[in-house]
Amino acid sequence: MLALRKIEPGVGGLSVDEVPVPEPGPGEVKIKVAYTGICGTDLHIYNWVPFAQRMQLPTVLGHETSGTIVAVGEGVSSVKVDDFISMESHISCGTCYTCHMGQANVCMNTRYPGVDIDGGFAPYVVVPEKIVWKQPEGISPQVAAMFEPFGIAVHASFKGRGMAGMNVLVAGCGPIGLMNIIVAKALGANRVIATDVSPTRLQQARDLAPDAVIDVSNGNQQAIKTIRDMTRRNGVDVSLEYSGAPQSLALISEVTVAGGELVMVGVPGGETLVNLETWLLKGFDIYNVHGRRLHSTWEQASKLVLDKKVDLEQLISHVMPISEAPRGVDLLLKGEGIKILIEPEDA
Ligand SMILES: [Zn+2]
Ligand SMILES: [Zn+2]
């Protein structure tokens, strides 16, 4: 079967080539892939950031997958052949203290399809039974492939006091930031304000019609003024930070009201500077969001999609066959496109 793999360490090293079709072992399921989305993580792997360097190459990439179960290994009981599913990307260990305390989404032994085991840029993928989410009727295969990233925006939006009635800043408009604009509106935020530095992303954000989209490529001054004007000088109740950029961290410190909430999603590369004194004196509640809650986030995400509170299809910028996946990666590296879905070619 034709698969997109990372075959060499270092920047680049992607290859589309023939690999054997995998078969499920005990506790595993074999999925016939419908679509797999290209994620920022795939771009990090392309760029061979420190996180990626633990990979045993070659590895089939891809973890944002939807598809149908076509075979199950010994002992699989929660799903069956012909079930239509989305993949959760975190394979938690299930046995450590963190997992036992109900926080499996931050298990430090987590493994990921497309990183630690072969992933979904292929006609078939084999994963542990416990990371498949059986989709109810009525979710399209393309939207199902977006549940993994969408779940992060949903998880972030249900932190703390949530979105209803709040003035909300989404700082950073990559695909998940854009999804968060959609979720914040769906959950009844009072004001939704978005910032970014890229003209393409700013336009993509405007297309979702939040209350304001502010270009911060020349610094934070305009954003600070606009946000004050829009919130009767109070500032926002909650900032959802998706960029990890120091300038953006400075912005949320400034424009979040004292006693408000910071929801941190974007990951800075290594250590970074924040004005912790401001964060402490303003008494922010600070939440870290990594992955999705298992499985409350999946339930919330399903409700939002099935009951048509959100439209994720508007974020699909391209659908490409696997042979063109490297071009899709290139497009995203150049800052073009939003969510690119890869469709397998027959095995
Ligand atoms: Zn992802
Ligand atoms: Zn664990």
Image (cartoon, rainbow, N blue to C red):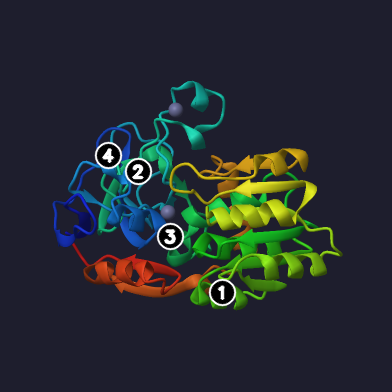
Q: Residues within 10 Å of mark 1 (few under 14, many from 20)?
A: many
Task: Report the side of 114 relative to 84 (left or right).
Answer: left
Residue of label 4 = 54
**Which numbered disc covers residue 51?**
2
Q: Give the CA separation, mark 1 to mark 4.
A: 34 Å
Mark 2 or mark 1: whose residue is earlier in sequence: 2
Q: Residues within 10 Å of mark 3 (few under 14, many from 20)?
A: many
**Which numbered disc covers residue 145?**
3
Q: Looking at the image, can residue 289 be seen? A: yes
Residue of label 1 = 202
Q: Give the CA separation, mark 2 to mark 1.
A: 28 Å
Mark 2 or mark 3: whose residue is earlier in sequence: 2
In front: mark 3 or mark 4? 4
Q: Amino acid at mark 3?
A: Ala
Please provide percent x and percent y for residue 164.
77, 56
For the point 59% across and 72% down, which residue is it?
Answer: 205
Q: Given contact means CB atoms under 8 Å apart, are the residues at marks 2 and 4 in contact?
A: yes
Task: Report the side of 154 relative to 233 (left or right).
Answer: left
